[in-house]
Image (spheres, rainbow, N blue to C red):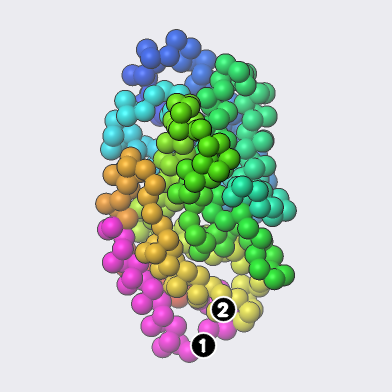
Amino acid sequence: MQPLENVLAGRLGQLRPLWSTNANAEVLLARCADVIRIAYARMALRHGSLSEDFHAYHNETHILDILGGRIDRLIATHGVFALGLRDWCILGLFAACHDLRQREEPMYEAGVGANERASIEETFRLLDHCGFSRSADADIYLAIDLTIGGSTFDARPPPGSAAFNAAELVQSGGALAAKLSQKLDKHRPDWRNDPRIVHAHDLALIAADLDTANVAEPFDRFASSAENLCLEREMLCLRNLDGVESAQPVLGFLTDGQDRFFFDLHRFNSELGRQSFGPAKDDNAARLKSLSLGLRARIAMRGRPQSGRQVLKAYAETVAGLV
């Protein structure tokens, strides 16, 4: 828990200039920290370092990536006064809670995935438990609903008999946040006249950018995140990394899949996100092309790969040559 405590302590200092804007700032921040601690512990126990159901990408480290470095970059780029204290708290809660549930049966409902819907409901229960009020803090509950819901990549069941695989969503049509306004138009036609919903929608766009800002990480960390997604995908597909059945899926994911997501599907949804992460994403573009070409060339020279693990080894070697 110490890495989390370090991030929470740092955030407390960053947000201190905003305390005067909220009469109950210390109480608010303490309650948020409690929710975040519980969510972090649950992720570690369910799918992280303390779990027998380890997910290589969706674990407590992903919480730290968003809660720490990515929100730090948002603050460094725009300043702490770019958003209100409650807004920063909501983004922190999103970081900790948006992936709480990873093993729900797929169910398509208004574009929101079953994992995300279950994560929203669990987050509401955590907020209740830690002293938040569904009436006095209605803005926080509303924003959690839209930010976590908007992080859905594709809620539709896969075609045929293919099993639902959360790690495949990196190759889907992008986050629901990009289409959230259309969903709200359908289900809440008057939402643009409600400032609370408008503001929660704006936060959902920023949250979606934070969630997918691995594209703007230093290149070695970006490449590592792709590898972790690949590992999680193969685990969920029940493919043996040491077997030939995983060789082509791993190669396809780390080349065509990443290229498609990075260059064709990924878009920043908010201006704050674009300004914070866009330049670093642009810096990664040429090296990603080199990585894909280099990995294909390395595989071609060695002959048809016999396992996914063999591809991952070649991938690591190719990355090392680019950083």
Residue 234 in the magenta stretch? The answer is no
- In which quadrant of the rendered image does the N terminus lie? top right
Q: What amino acid is labelled 1 in the image?
A: Arg
Q: Residue at x 67, y 42 (%)?
A: 118
Q: Earlier in the sequence, mark 2 or mark 1?
A: 2
Label 2–label 1 contact, CB within 8 A = yes
Residue 159 % position (x, y): 66, 68
Q: Is residue 43 visible?
A: no
Q: Which residue is mark 2?
A: 247
Residue count near mark 1 (Cα–Cα under 10 Å), binned few <14, some 14–19, many ≥20: few
Is 187 in front, or is 61? 187
Q: Residue at x 56, y 20 (%)?
A: 137
Q: Which residue is mark 1?
A: 304
Q: What amino acid is labelled 2 in the image?
A: Ala
Is 53 in front, or is 271? 271
Residue count near mark 2 (Cα–Cα under 10 Å), binned few <14, some 14–19, many ≥20: many
What residue range appears in magenta?
282-311
Up the image or down, 229 lies above or below 291; here it is: above
Is 157 in front, or is 227? 157
- In which quadrant of the rendered image does the C terminus lie? bottom left
Q: Residue at x 62, y 21 (%)?
A: 134
- Mark 2 residue element: helix
The circle on residue 33 is none
Up the image or down, 208 lies above or below 164; here it is: above
